[in-house]
Image (cartoon, rainbow, N blue to C red):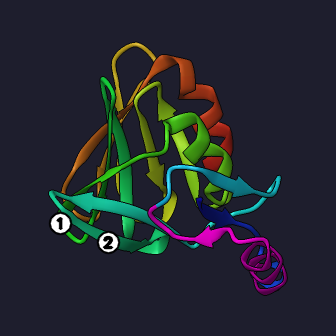
Amino acid sequence: MKVRLLVREERYAEIYKQLSAAGIEIDDTADLILSENNVCVKYLIGRQGDDIFRLDVREITHIESFAHDIIAYSGGAEYKLTERLRRLEEILDPGEFIRVSNSAIVAVHHIKSIRPAISQKYLLTLTDGSKVDVTRTYYYIFKEFLGI
């Protein structure tokens, strides 16, 4: 059995040792995830075709959902993720990432400009040139988060 661990760094070695002793293999690409509550990850596992990448979350500009595909944008490249947006919202640092629509999460430090749009919306331009909408549902949450 293969398991991916999403636990605090200080507990990783201890849990890894216990699971390994029980015959459970730890693998960052495993579909089964063992996680702690309120843990913020530093890396996500993304795929491009058959290649698997370990993505530093500080380099991710935004994450979008297209039907069943979740795409992370980092360094001008696109990586397919296996986690759902709701799960990503839980495991990414809430001080660094914010949900701006039903289909997008952005890294706050990658916001280059904010343009008000019609009907309680914002249009964000990110450091990589991407444009992402803050929808009406998330408008006040976004405003309060940034203090605008």
Left or right, residue 44 beside residue 114? right
Q: Is residue 21 magenta?
A: yes
Q: Residue furthest front?
A: 23
Q: Residues within 10 Å of mark 1 (few under 14, many from 20)?
A: few
**Residue at disc 2, secondary structure:** strand
Left or right, residue 7 beside residue 42? right
Question: Front-most of 23 and 119?
Answer: 23
Q: Is residue 113 magenta?
A: no
Q: Residue at x 79, y 79 (%)?
A: 21
Q: Residue at x 71, y 56 (%)?
A: 34
> At label 2, which amino acid type do we have?
Phe
Left or right, residue 111 beside residue 21? left
Residue indicated by mark 2 = 53
The magenta stretch spans which residues? Answer: 12-29
The image position of residue 69, as x and y in percent, is 30, 35
Residue indicated by mark 1 = 76
Residue 52, picture quadrant: bottom left
Left or right, residue 42 beside residue 20? left
Is residue 68 shown above or below 137?
A: below
Q: Quadrant of the C terminus?
A: top right
| Mark 1 vs 2, N-terminal side | 2
